[in-house]
Image (tube, grey):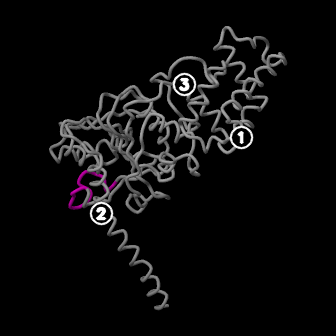
Amino acid sequence: MFGNERSMLTRVVPVARFISRRLRAVRQVHGDGDGDGDGEGRLHFHKSKGQHILINPRILDTIVRKSAINPTDTVLEIGPGTGNLTIKLLEAAHKVVAFEIDHRMVQVLVKRALRQGLNDKLRVIKKDAVKALFPRFDLVVANIPYQISSPLVMKLVYGATPFRSATLLLQKEFAQRLVANPGDSEFSRLSVNVKLLADVELVMNVSKRDFLPSPKVDSSVVIIRPKPQVPNVDLREWRAFTSNCFNNRYKTLGATFKNKRKVFELLKISNENDKASSHKGDDAEDEVGFTSFKEKIIGVLRTGEFEDKRPAKLSIEELLHLLSLFNQAGIYFSNHGHLKREDRFDDADE
């Protein structure tokens, strides 16, 4: 009996010590004697909503330092949570605009900023950052919930608001897709869409143990810097083109674009865009038009030597060249019109 009790104690004590260390870490970050001064200690974090609070002061300091914040900068933060990162941003920047939809987090954040005498530099917007219009800002620094990583990154990169850089803490697997190069196993449509308009730098990896509550996987910090000069390409056309190419990134382009359903789909789109098209007629019944259009697609692929190539191994320059060849031949992937601010990417764009 006593032996079992001693065995149980040996298992419980390390867990208790671990919890104690976690609480000390939270209090250290919050600068709080009891950890409950602002109500944070009583909060319940929802993992399903991506509420994982970064509590490692060293990582927080590194994120702020790598962001290269100027005293005149306005920083955009998405999902500030209880403000561990926000307070450090307020100390470094002229102003912080924080998007937070959880009113409990907002209450804690505002109280902490007030206690530090920084509340006049903080503006909290209680809206969904993916759907709302962004005000003017210079930098983005944020710990992004995984559920909105893709649409949010695309909104920043393809959005109408110019910015200098975005320092983002993301799930490691997602960050690896952002920095992947042609031929890498992680190289995807997300990779080419982001790198068309921006450069991405991997700063550091962050252990899941540095969060409260701990997520299931590790994270990474990346910096996205918009390119000063970008290719002259219709962004909506590019978006539709990469969707077609990367629907099965390991299939050859010849196999993808010879597919009967794909040919009919592109024939319809191209006819709508090209009023002078020689392939007019009922898309589904005009076999002559269908055959002629399919031969045109194959001709483009063979002319550019793309027929046996796979999109996962093509550079952005090669993909741009292929898209140009298609368009020159009267083959289009979307209705004409440049990408508008309200057009956003969703999970399918990964």
Q: Nearer the viewer, residue 1 or 266?
A: 266
Q: CA distance from mark 2 to mark 1?
A: 55 Å
Q: Secondary structure at mark 1?
A: loop
Magenta stretch, main secondary structure, is: loop
Q: Earlier in the sequence, mark 3 or mark 2?
A: 2
Horizontal arrangement in the rendering, residue 129 relative to residue 91 (left or right): right
Magenta highlight range: 30-42
Q: CA distance from mark 3 to mark 2?
A: 46 Å
In the structure shown, which secondary structural element does the residue marked by tag 3 occupy? helix
Query: What residue did someone put label 2 on?
Result: 25
Q: Residue furthest top?
A: 276
Secondary structure type for disc 2: helix
Query: Could you give the CA–CA distance between mark 3 and mark 1, rounded to whole angstroms?
Result: 26 Å
Q: Residues within 10 Å of mark 1 (few under 14, many from 20)?
A: few
Check the picture and name the quadrant holding the C terminus: top right
Q: Amino acid at mark 2?
A: Ala
Query: Which amino acid does the dot numbered 1 rest on?
Result: Asp
220 sits to left or right of 116: right
Could you tell me residue 178's position as x and y percent?
A: 48, 45
**Which mark's residue is nearer the viewer, 3 or 1?**
1
Q: Residues within 10 Å of mark 3 (few under 14, many from 20)?
A: some
Numbered circle sitting on residue 308: 1
The answer to whether residue 21 is left or right of residue 219 is left
Q: Residue at x 43, y 49 (%)?
A: 170
* Residue under pointer 3: 236
- Give the quarter of the image for residue 210: bottom left
